[in-house]
Image (tube, grey):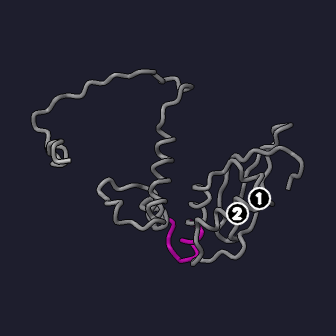
Amino acid sequence: MYVGMMCTAKKCGIRFQASSYCLNLERKPRGKFASALCQFRNFSKFSDCTRAAEQLKNNPRHKSYLEQVSLRQLEKLFSFLRGYLSGQSLAETMEQIRRETTIDPEEDLNKLDDKELAKRKSIMDELFEKNQKKKDDPNFVYDIEVEFPQDDQLQSCGWDTESADEF
């Protein structure tokens, strides 16, 4: 690869036939583009995508090039590869990834194990960061006041109707 040069990752994709990822890089001093093709080793349809993505991102050989690529994107790439190796179609794999990366508002998070709960929390954190208004945003307004309509049809939850004397 390009040792000693500052590179910025522009695109990251996957190749199914060679079980590898392709990374398009921009070399900083001149602004020229280059591609790197790196094979995944020891990855099968039974592998854990999260663990494989973490190992790849923390690998000393790949670390500097994958710095700008999010862990979530690498996990998705590994999920696509695992789906391909399992014999799933691209549409089936995409639907499975969509189900795994979206939060169902009706889902009871209390019933999830620690690993699944941590996954849901990281999805919520990522969504929060994506939707958060920052001071640098053009539509940022500092102290927004919103009046909510008073509806006589509001349902009581029950937990807030008990008196404070019971405590």
**What's the amino acid at mark 2?**
Leu
Vertical order, 25 against 60 (above or below): above
Relative depth, front residue between 85 and 79: 79
Quadrant for the N terminus in the image: bottom right
Residue 39 image point, x, y percent: 74, 68
Query: What's the residue at 62%, 67% (across, down)?
Result: 51
- Is 136 left or right of 147, judged from the image as shown? right
CB under 8 Å between discs 2 and 1: yes
Q: Amino acid at mark 1?
A: His
Q: Which residues are magenta?
A: 80-90
Which mark, by number, is residue 56?
2
The residue under the point 48% across, 24% down is 140
As helix, strand or loop, the secondary structure at mark 2 comes to helix
145 in magenta = no
Instruction: Give residue 76's position: percent from left, percent from top.
Output: 56, 60
Which secondary structure dominates the residues rendered in magenta?
Answer: helix
Marks 2 and 1, how far apart at CA: 7 Å
User: What residue is pinned by disc 1?
Assistant: 62
Circle nearer the N terminus (2, 1): 2
Task: Tell me residue 137's x, y (percent).
Answer: 53, 26
Viewer-nearest residue: 123 or 26: 123
